[in-house]
Amino acid sequence: MSGIARDAAELAAVQPLRPAEGSRWRGLVLPVTALALWWLLSSLDIANSALLVSPAKVFDTAAEQVASGRLWRALSASLAREATGFTIGTASGLVLGALLGLSPLFNRIVGPSFNTFKQISLFAWIPLISVWFGLGDVAKVVFLSLAALVPVVVNTCDGIRTVPPGLLEVARVYGFTRWQTVTQVVLPAALPAIFTGVYLALIYSWLATIGAEYLLVSGKGIGNTLIEGSEHFQMDLVIFGMVVIGTVGWLMNASARALERRLARWTGRAT
Amino acid sequence: MSAEAELRAVLQRQDPAPTRAPLPWRRIAARATDAALPWLLPVALVALWFAGADRGWISAQVLPPPQFVWDTLRDLATSGDLWLHVSTSFTRVGVGFIAGTLLGLALGSAMGLSHRFEAYVLPTFNALVQIPVLAWLPFVLLIVGIGEPLKYILIAKAALVPVALNTLQGFRQTPVALREVGQVYGYSRRQQVMEIVLPHAVPTLFTGVRLGFTKAWLSLVVVELVASSEGLGYLIVYGRQLFQLDLVMAAVIVVGAIGYAIDRLLDRLETAANRRRPGGAR
């Protein structure tokens, strides 16, 4: 299976599937029941109360975090880092991917090394990065860029290399220069694949943001909120952090999907 | 081969006047150059690494000499420490991955076979999927403690998600035409599933399992980095704490090599499974 097909499958695995049938109320049954059960259990006071916090307590913590501005500070710190790392990683990924896709010689020289490099589990880089770049923002941004880089390179390169030969033939017939062929034929045809890479980069860099805050503990961020909650046995804070992280991830997913639909319509019209 | 090169090759083959065949030694030289190219970059990097360590451009604390890393790797292997950590990690990833895959297959096929079950469960599942493994970690940590169950649960969760989603997708994508054929032949529901839906879903299902392994392996490293006193991830953290970068790099190499080997194995299996799919020869 080629890299691109695998990434498409990977994307499918991070995108929520739509239920086949309408009836939305059925989807609410499970969460509402769980919430009621949770509320009941915590009010009965039968289990370890430090861990089984009541929904009301979580709500209070959430309100306090929002009102005190702590949520905003943590979230903006995390998102600023993510944006920086994502931008750097995506930009360099596009360049590297385009070079790998367009130049057979460059691909022959760099491709195998890159493929070996990307096998190394992303988080395994953190200890090395921490030695080379410290524990501060620089190290985190380096790590995030790395997380964003890999999917962009893979998909850009594959997208360029799988341009239908028919299109290239047309370009030849019309006597396009190499530059015209690349900008007017190859890149537009590779655009959906490139977008898949960027989309994955967005998701990976968000995961990496949380990971970086975990493993390069210093500074403030939404991941640090989680760690704090865990260290002080504050289940309410932990649950609040999880909900925030999940919501941000969902929002990123949803906006990228909306963009993708628009892009699909645009490329559909162009061809 | 790029599409362009392929095209050029086709065009050349149709050339009515064949060009003179290149001299054999030139062809051999060209092939040798082609084979050597991928080694250019790694060899240059390693040479630079050797030279840098030798001339003292970089301190050993920042980048230990390659000889150090190699020695550490050999020491780890011969002292048996490596096998201890590898087997711990394998147990974790094995238990977590198998449990997650089985649960994912069950959940995915239940959702794929029953629209009602899907309507009840999928929205909640989708919401929970948005929370990454690292965000689950403190939650599960507070509930089950820092022991082995923590690792099993998180690795299982990581594997479960892609397996369940791909299974559901695989069950959903049965072509209508095939389903109609089943109806024409008066298949029972069981026959429909066993003979039409399932065979058609196998490749997608396998993709899910493979992705599940990738995620499980990634999560293993994360979990061991954060909360463990054994295993390959721990070895990395331990080396970092002692400022033994040679140990860190040796452990990273082992993690990469094992991940790569298993990925290759699953790739082979996947290709084999794809070859057997109905209409897979297309």
Image: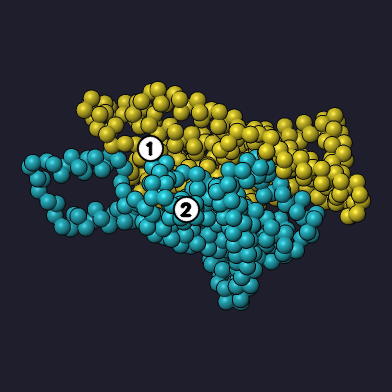
Residue A88 seen from this side: no
Q: Are marks 2 and 1 in contact (CB under 8 Å)?
A: no
User: What x and y, as percent, mark residue A49?
Assistant: 90, 51
Q: Helix, strand or loop at disc 2? A: loop
Q: Which chain is cyan?
A: B
Question: For the point 40% across and 34% down, which residue is it?
Answer: A190
Q: Colour of chain A?
A: yellow
| Mark in front: 2 vs 1 | 2
Q: Is residue A68 above or below residue B102?
A: above
For mark 1, name the chain: A
Q: Return the residue found at the far bottom.
A: B79
Distance Cα–Cα, label 2 vs label 1 = 46 Å
Q: Nearer the viewer, residue A3 or A103?
A: A3
The kind of residue tagged 1 is: Ile
Which residue, given by chain and number where applicable, does mark 2 sit on?
B188
Q: Is residue B194 above or below residue A211?
A: below
For mark 2, name the chain: B
Question: For the point 77% across and 31% down, which residue is it?
Answer: A72
